[in-house]
């Protein structure tokens, strides 16, 4: 099963803190809806751009995309 990374972009000097805060809400959503999502995190791309993300099975992507409205997505690969 292919995994997809749903991504929320945050820009500006407070992007890291905003991404961290958004991740709290994503984890709350996962817990409230009893979802089997175990990979969630943030990444600081530079001092003006950070992302929050979750990794989901491709088969579960569409309802989560519609409910959570990520900015973008990509195929997830473990580095």
Image: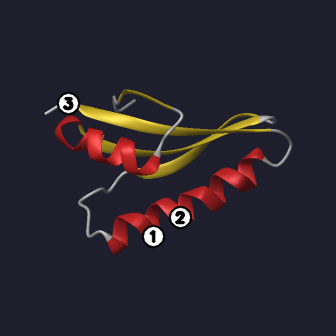
- From the top left corner, tell me how far across and down residue 2 is, in percent: 20, 30
Which residue is located at x 47 percent, y 59 percent?
A: 26
- From the top left corner, tell me how far across and down residue 71 is, in percent: 54, 34
- From the top left corner, tell me how far across and down residue 22 is, in percent: 60, 57
Which residue occupies the extreme left position in the image?
A: 1
Residue 24, quarter of picture? bottom right
> From the viewer's perspective, is the residue at label 1 or at label 3 nearer?
1
Q: Read off the residue under disc 2.
A: 25
Whether the residues at callouts 2 and 3 have beta carbons within 8 Å, the answer is no
Whether the residues at callouts 1 and 2 have beta carbons within 8 Å, the answer is yes
Give the spatial CA distance, label 1 vs label 3. 24 Å
Q: Is residue 42 left or right of residue 79?
A: right
Q: Is residue 57 above or below residue 29?
A: above
- Of labels 2 and 3, earlier in sequence is 3
Q: Secondary structure at mark 2?
A: helix
Which residue occupies the extreme bottom position in the image?
A: 32
Which residue occupies the extreme right position in the image?
A: 13
Q: Is residue 21 left or right of residue 27?
A: right
Q: Secondary structure at mark 3?
A: loop
Give the spatial CA distance, label 1 vs label 2. 5 Å
> From the viewer's perspective, is the residue at label 2 or at label 3 nearer?
2
Q: Read off the residue under disc 3.
A: 2
Q: Read off the residue under disc 1.
A: 28
Q: Secondary structure at mark 1?
A: helix
Which residue occupies the extreme top position in the image?
A: 75
- From the top left corner, tell me how far across and down residue 40 is, in percent: 43, 52
Q: Is residue 3 left or right of residue 30?
A: left
Color style of the picture: secondary structure
Q: Is residue 4 above or below residue 33?
A: above
Between 23 and 68, the one nearer to me in the picture: 68
Neighbor class of circle 2 (other Cα within 10 Å; few <14, some 14-19, many 20+) is few
């Amino acid at each position: 099963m292919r995994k997809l990374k749903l991504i929320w972009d945050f820009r500006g000097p407070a992007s890291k803190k905003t991404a961290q805060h958004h991740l709290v809400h994503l984890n709350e959503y996962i817990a409230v809806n009893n979802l089997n999502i175990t990979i969630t995190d943030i990444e600081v791309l530079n001092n003006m751009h950070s992302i929050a993300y979750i990794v989901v099975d491709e088969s579960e992507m569409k309802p989560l995309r519609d409910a959570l409205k990520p900015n973008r997505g990509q195929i997830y690969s473990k580095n």
